[in-house]
Image: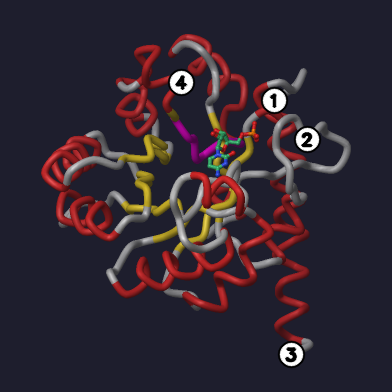
Amino acid sequence: MSPRERLIIALDVGSAEEAELLVSRIGEAGVFYKIGMELVYAGGLPLVRRLVGEGKQVFVDLKLHDIPNTVERAAAQIARLGASFLTIHAYPQTMKAALAGTAGSKLKVLGVTVLTSMNDKDLVEAGYASGVETTVVHRARQAKSRGLDGLVLSPREVAMVRGVVGNHLILVTPGIRPKGSGAGDQKRVMTPAEAIAAGTDHIVVGRPVTEARDPKAAVASITADIERGLGERKNAIAAG
Ligand code: C5P
């Protein structure tokens, strides 16, 4: 996988026109884009097919969770659009249904273990018996045993989850901030190089690109940082 493919650019903008303008400004440097709820609800779903038609990879971040029949059929529809990644909440029924709906397609299903906005207190308030770390490990184990393709998690959880799932699952981490850019509402951030060195496969970056004066230059600089992270990872492996 090339360093460029490791960077997933979150198209968190309010219209398909704005998203297309951003994609054209970034040009060849951007190969993988994430389309989430904001853009989909603003009429951006047809953009999935358009980007795929231009040779880009698309991550549809809709975090599905419903009764199995609905999840299976919704996942099958997204597979038809030609997307590469789809998120679901990593509940056993939902994982099984999404895998059934995407069987035979190239769409990979990624599970959200615990939303990174939740802490132990939030989980107790929602009626859970365990805290974040225990729940993340529990769900990562289930995801692996049920054959899920990957997980979305905080960069701080990557090393721990890699220890649980080995190299069987694709790990994707948002909460990334290049040196010198503001954290915004992200609380536990890492730089692209740090997250890649920690063992994640893909990083998701939104505002540091979408709000940059020169998005193309921002993408180039993040990609260079990813290369540094890959170098560090290689050196760490070589050092044992
Ligand atoms: O602008 P920023 O780089 O913080 O954007 C991160 C993207 O990753 C957003 O689209 C956000 O919805 C998504 N995301 C996240 N944390 C998660 C799951 C998804 O920030 N746990």
The answer for how far apart the CA atoms under marks 4 and 1 are is 20 Å
Helix, strand or loop at mark 4: helix
Residue assigned mark 4:
38
Q: Is the residue marked 2 within 8 Å of ligand 1, measured from its CB?
A: no
Residue assigned mark 1:
215
In the rendered structure, does residue 216 fall within the stretch colored magenta?
A: no
Question: Which is nearer the N-term, disc 4 or disc 1?
Answer: 4
The answer for how far apart the CA atoms under marks 1 and 2 are is 17 Å
Residue assigned mark 2:
183
Question: Which is nearer the N-term, disc 1 or disc 2?
Answer: 2
Question: Which is nearer the N-term, disc 4 or disc 2?
Answer: 4
Q: Residues within 10 Å of mark 1 (few under 14, many from 20)?
A: many
Question: Which is nearer the N-term, disc 4 or disc 3?
Answer: 4
Range covered by the magenta-colored residues: 29-35
Q: Residues within 10 Å of mark 4 (few under 14, many from 20)?
A: some
Residue 35 against residue 84 in the figure, above or below: above
User: What x and y, as percent, mark residue 166?
Assistant: 50, 78
Q: Is residue 146 left or right of residue 173?
A: left
The numbered mark at residue 30 is: none
Q: Amino acid at mark 1?
A: Pro
Instruction: For the C terminus, give its image quadrant.
Output: bottom right
